[in-house]
Amino acid sequence: MSITAVKGMNDILPGEVETWQFLELSAREVFGLYGFSEIRTPIPEKTELFCRSIGETTDIVEKEMYSFSDKGENSLTLRPEGTAPVMRSFIQNRLHNLDPVSKLYYMGPMFRYERPQKGRYRQFHQLGVEVVGVEDAKIDAQVLAMLHQYFIRIGIDSVSLQINSLGCPECRPGYRQTLISYLESRLDTLCAECQRRYQTNPLRVLDCKAQGCQAATVDAPSVIEHLCSPCNDHFRQVKSYLDLLNIPFEVNARMVRGLDYYVRTTFELVTDQLGSQNAVAAGGRYDGLVESLGGPSLPGIGFAIGLERLVLMKGEQRISAGGPQLFIAALGEEATERAFVLMSQLQAAGVRAEMDYLGKSLKAQMRRANKLNATFTLVLGEEELESGQAQLKNMSDSSQSVVAMDSLVAMLTEKLG
Ligand code: ATP
Ligand code: MG
């Protein structure tokens, strides 16, 4: 039996990889415009990094991590998300000494042991950004404006922005207690999972997908109504800056994030096109995270976009790679050799050129030129070698023109390069 890939982990094949490249390149362009630089961190990290940052009682740490012992018996984990590794690197490399405001982005695979389904995989890819060093609400709005701009750039408009504030260590404990008391009075209608976690992670009940939990929390106390006055001011400012920039949004007081480090502004970009996997991007503030990982006391904010979900949404609008600009069809040994040299010269000069390697008939070669979607074809046979001239055929309108062989490279690089 042949060996297959690990369950929930996908190959990205030619034909779809062009869409990925488009999404990645667009991110580099847009994030670059806003002053972000790329950072690349290793895929495994020490397990404790994620336990300490994401939180022991979160879904990720409780059940989704790919953790293993290496040969030195160190517990390592394939990164389930990007923020903790980037902050680890930020602290380790003292990036705050280089610039008081760090704007970083990353892209690459993440790993979570989840039940694979459409839009949910065990190896998936995120594109994320982080800003460290700014508490001002302008940066929250700018990060959201950049996210908005990215979606415009990639041509996906069927998404909406939901924002919320989760408060801070001053006001959240009070809210948490209020919520726990509220949940206690409706315990029997919660799902088993939420009955288990309502005391350790009560906020998570608010975004549980089980019907009973949703019904039970319709009238749950709202986090926004329990914000302390600095958090309230900050949230008000975020909203007014978003209005100022004409970024549409909706406040969703029930949106909580599944990671413990979030404070104040949190957000999700949601779509109704992907069934229950409705979040295409998510993020928020993590003002205490850098310090809790042993770094300086600096605020931070960021988001991560799930690339698989974007690719699914691009669907029919798939990006395709361009076919060859020139396909050289050759007949006979001498002409084939000439075609081979010509093709190499053209490729070196920046023209996408292609030929047949399988000894096919002229007819089959023309069929292949068609299939590859070549812009032009050139037929080389004995006659052409003798006369020093060949027919260049424009495949879109079948028009032909005669070209001189010795000026072919110069003429084609001029025309196509
Ligand atoms: P969800 O609610 O869908 O489980 P999440 O809150 O766990 O998402 P985050 O940790 O905030 O997601 O990750 C940001 C984005 O990464 C998500 O909005 C989603 O687009 C994508 N994502 C998360 N988990 C997966 C996965 N297992 N497979 C594919 N994409 C994922
Ligand atoms: Mg999840």
Image (cartoon, rainbow, N blue to C red):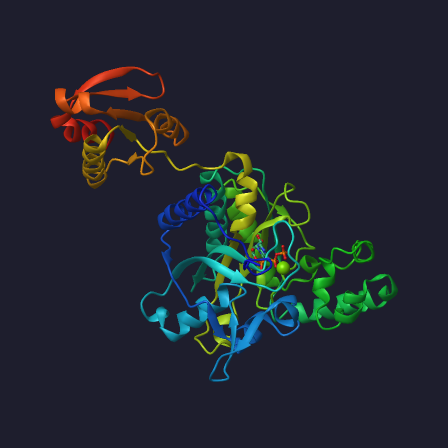
Does 259 sit above or below residue 218? below
Q: Residue at x 40, y 69 (%)?
A: 90
**Residue 223, can we see it?**
yes
Give the position of the N terminus as an image quadrant.
bottom right
Give the quadrant of the C terminus. Answer: top left
Q: Position of residue 9 (x, y in %)?
A: 55, 57
**Ligand 2 occupies quarter:** bottom right
Task: State which quadrant residue 316 falls in.
Answer: top right
> Residue at coordinates 56% horizontally, 61% vertically from top-left?
6
Q: Nearer the viewer, residue 364 or 63?
A: 364
Task: Give the camera-side residue of 271 and 10.
Answer: 10
Using the image, determine if residue 415 lies above or below residue 3.
above
**Is 285 on the left-hand or right-hand side of 95?**
right
Q: Is residue 358 left or right of residue 114?
A: left
x and y percentages locating residue 351 in the rendered image: 25, 35
Spot the residue most to the bottom: 72
Determine the image quadrant of residue 350. Answer: top left
Residue appearing at x 18%, y 20% in the figure? 383
Residue 334 to residue 85: above or below: above
Identify which residue, 87 or 21, lies in the foreground: 21
Can residue 298 be seen here? The reply is: no
